[in-house]
Image: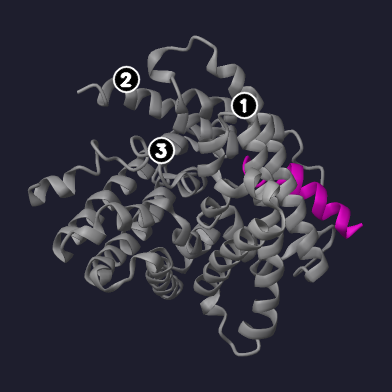
């Protein structure tokens, strides 16, 4: 039951893009085309889940026992940067076709605040399940990371589809580009607001 | 470039929010009220000025291949310092801004200025650039915060001048995108032209 609550809450109610505002820069940057949006979502899913596992273990077995929680920010970002670099090298070796598809997005992910945001959230925030609330364990953290990145992918791909249509429309000059995109996102966020109160 | 123009360019010409379109996450997330926007802007300003100064000082010593990780460590160090300072002196603001204080590390404005300005200019100029861009960011965030607070709760800097509730959507997520979108339209229409 707790897993179901985590999944629904992370995908719909607290959608990482439309409700938590994490990872907006790449969201606005690469959502011009459906294919690049799909590639970016795939890469983000992969890195968020992997980074959450590593930072969760790092926090639990290294930082907390030695009372070094204040190093969370600095150590997490280093772990993420190293991880992205490593994923890039491994992927290049074992799956060149996947590297072709995700390759250009990987370096951008280090500075995607969704990754660091999820990593910090799972180790600092208490989650509420009905009447009680507690910190997540490792399995729940992984499920949360996966569900969050699925939510990221859903919002990203939906928006890319809308934006492809937007490109052909005749909008006033000062609305062109980003402003009209932001107004479209706002309407999407309103639709997602309909899910609030579900869990 | 004169010293004054380094400081003033952040407001209009190189405005980080409306022209460079950097650091969108804190811009949208923390501007629920004018005060929150102002606090977030000042927090970013603090990190930006100090990291710009240190990066401009160490830039000649850093090998080109590892310069990004080195810059990130410098920025993360100052963010940690900021977290300590805010926990001690402004615990309220630290609570409200929450996650977005550690996320200054991945704010593209800070790394962007390190790459575009600090690593090829002197310490004084880099500090001024940090102040200028930081103030521009603070001003934009405060403006968005003011607009959202007036529409969303009928008050300004906490001073309520309309009784009753405002348009609640402006305090929530959709209003953030909507307010930023329309402010960007106004900026394009009236400011960017000249």
Q: Are marks 2 and 3 on the same chain?
A: yes
Where is residue A127, by image quadrant?
bottom right
Quarter of the C terminus of chain B within the rendering: top left
Residue named by callout 3: B144
Pointer 2 chain: B
Distance from disc 2 to disc 1, alpha carbons, whole Å, reads 23 Å
**Magenta range:** A1-18
Q: Which residue of the protein is positioned furthest toward the left in this rendering?
A: B2
Q: Any mark on residue A32, and which?
A: none
Residue named by callout 2: B189
**Is residue A87 one of those drawn in magenta?**
no
Kindly state the secondary structure of the residue where label 3 is placed. Answer: helix
Q: For mark 3, does the 10 Å Cα neighbourhood hold few (<14), some (14 to 19), or many (20 or more) residues?
A: many
Q: In x, y percent, where is residue B13? A: 23, 36
Residue named by callout 1: A187
Question: How many marks do you count on the picture?
Answer: 3
Q: Please, what is the dominant secondary structure of the magenta stretch?
A: helix
Pointer 3 chain: B
Closer to the camera in the image, B153 or B102: B102
Q: In x, y percent, where is residue A170? A: 49, 9
Kindly report which numbered mark, 2 or 3, lies closer to the viewer in this rendering: 2
Kindly state the secondary structure of the residue where label 1 is placed. Answer: helix
Classify B113 as above or below A176.
below
Q: How is the image coloured?
A: one colour
Q: Which residue of the protein is positioned furthest toward the right in this rendering?
A: A1
């Amino acid at each position: 039951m707790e897993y179901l609550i985590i999944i629904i809450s992370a995908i719909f109610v607290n959608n990482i893009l439309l409700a938590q505002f994490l990872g907006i820069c790449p969201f606005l940057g690469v959502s011009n085309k459906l294919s690049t949006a799909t590639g970016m979502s795939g890469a983000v899913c992969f890195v968020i889940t992997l980074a959450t596992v590593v930072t969760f273990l790092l926090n639990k077995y290294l930082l907390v026992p030695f009372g070094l929680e204040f190093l969370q920010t600095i150590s997490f970002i280093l772990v993420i940067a190293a991880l992205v670099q490593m994923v890039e090298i491994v992927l290049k070796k074992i799956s060149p076709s996947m590297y072709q598809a995700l390759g250009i997005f990987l370096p951008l992910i280090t500075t995607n605040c969704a990754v660091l945001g999820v990593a910090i959230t799972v180790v600092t925030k208490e989650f509420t399940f009905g009447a009680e609330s507690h910190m997540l364990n490792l399995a729940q953290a992984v499920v949360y990371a996966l569900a969050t990145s699925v939510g990221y992918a859903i919002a990203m791909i939906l928006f890319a589809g809308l934006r492809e249509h937007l490109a052909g429309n005749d909008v006033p000059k000062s609305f062109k580009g980003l402003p009209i995109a932001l107004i479209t996102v706002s309407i999407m966020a309103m639709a997602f607001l309909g899910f609030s109160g579900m869990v | 470039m004169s010293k004054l123009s380094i400081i003033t360019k952040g407001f209009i010409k190189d405005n980080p929010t409306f022209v460079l379109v950097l650091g969108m996450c804190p811009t949208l997330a923390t501007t629920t009220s004018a005060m929150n926007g102002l606090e977030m802007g000042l927090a970013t300003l603090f990190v930006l000025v100090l990291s710009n100064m240190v990066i401009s000082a160490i830039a000649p010593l850093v090998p080109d291949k590892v310069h990004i990780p080195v810059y990130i460590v410098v920025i993360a160090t100052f963010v940690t310092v900021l977290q300590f300072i805010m926990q001690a002196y402004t615990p309220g603001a630290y609570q409200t801004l929450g996650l977005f204080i550690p996320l200054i590390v991945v704010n593209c404005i800070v790394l962007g200025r390190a790459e575009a300005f600090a690593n090829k200019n002197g310490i004084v100029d880099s500090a001024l650039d940090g102040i200028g861009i930081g103030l521009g960011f603070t001003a934009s965030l405060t403006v968005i915060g003011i607009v959202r607070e007036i529409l969303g709760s009928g008050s300004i800097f906490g001073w309520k001048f309309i009784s009753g509730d405002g348009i609640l959507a402006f305090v929530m997520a959709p209003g953030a995108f909507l307010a930023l979108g329309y402010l960007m339209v106004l900026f394009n229409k009236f400011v960017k032209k000249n």
